Amino acid sequence: MDNIKDYTLPALTEWMAQRGEPAFRARQVFQWLYQRRVTGFEQMSNVARPLRRRLGESFSLGGMARQDVRHSRDGSVKYALRLDDGQCIEAVLMPNNTHYTLCISTQVGCAMGCDFCMTARMGLVRNLSAGEIVQQVVEAYGGVEEGGLIRNLVFMGMGEPLHNYDNLVRALTILTEDHGFGFSWRRLTVSTSGLVPAIRRFAADRLPANLAISLNAVSDETRARLMPVNRRWNIAALLDACREIPKEPRVRITFEYVLLKGITDSLADARKLVKLLHGIKCKVNLIPFNPWPGSTYEGPSLEHARAFQEELLHRGLLTTLRISKGQDIQAACGQLITASPAARWRKVAG
Ligand code: SF4
């Protein structure tokens, strides 16, 4: 049975047309799915009963079981969500002053093998479907206060989003549909470890979502040690691709940079980073490493992280220092992992 949340609005409109139903029926169903977030087709009260029955015979609603919900002292909530085949993924809801940001997963596990990342230890189990990506937003709304709004989505959970390109793009299309959630493209941020051909494709497809590049080191030697993807596409190739992305006014690429004590956090590294990014319209997001059980890395002190940030700011590089939310529940960057039954546990080299 198909998951109805794999369908874009044009695809659902086509399904309706093939059954003699007008286009507005698809729009109505989208509103029920994403604005009212119903849990059964019978709840779609302005849809005729025979059509509701037909929808129920043809589609599942793609619901997920909440295997675990953990609340952090800082207000973040981590959801472990069980998929139809028993696999598990995680999504993290983070409150801000006026709205929420949701970090979502695009794969079960990840193939990229970044050495500082807990998810990497699972290896890649499988891609998520578009409907499974979208459903994380539906599930997270259960943790949002009455009248609250999830305004930002960051694709920085488990997985390399651009490694699951087609399903990612389909999910983005569904999430930004006005008759559904209606997210603004500018509120969506897709993170990548640096898959250069996929970055070029993303640019050629003119997808207006923000791109965040996980850079994390200033020399190929260090980056290749931390991120195997660098052995295929080195820093120069990655930055060339970034320079070629057509940018609208006021839009910047974000470079994520994990501060690993004694490895990527020297002030000389900071100065080299400024040189590397010269000429690219960008901002840098510094992320002090969050240790996880078994990790061999340490994060710098807050004082040192601030000094690194100052070094960049002094030289005119727009830089933020992200103190990851949810550290006490292992929901912070690089800490998402689940006990998926099919996970291939790999030893992470120290
Ligand atoms: S940091 Fe991202 S791309 Fe790298 S292994 Fe972890 S989830 Fe995958």
Image: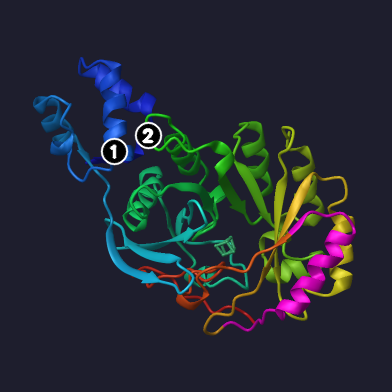
Distance from disc 1 to disc 2, alpha carbons, whole Å, reads 7 Å
- Element assignment for label 1: helix
Mark 2 element type: loop
Magenta-drawn segment: 295-319
State left or right for residue 83 relative to residue 157. left
Which residue is rendered at x = 62% and y = 53% of the image? 192
Q: Amino acid at mark 1?
A: Leu
Q: Quadrant of residue 202?
A: top right
Which residue is label 2 attached to? 180
Q: Is residue 39 left or right of residue 72?
A: left
Name the spot of residue 140 as percent of width and height, x first: 37, 55
Magenta segment includes 42: no
Q: Specify the quadrant of the image occupied by residue 292.
A: bottom right
Residue at figure coordinates x 89%, y 71% from the top left: 268
Identify the image quadrant of the N terminus: top left
Q: How is the image coloured?
A: rainbow
The answer to whether 231 is drawn above or below residue 8 in the figure is below
Is residue 16 in view?
A: yes
- Check mark 1 vs ligand 1: CB closer than 8 Å? yes or no: no
Q: Quadrant of ligand 1?
A: bottom right
Q: Amino acid at mark 2?
A: Gly
Q: Is residue 263 visible?
A: no
* Between 348 and 38, the one nearer to me in the picture: 38
Q: Residues within 10 Å of mark 2 (few under 14, many from 20)?
A: many
Residue behind mark 1 = 33
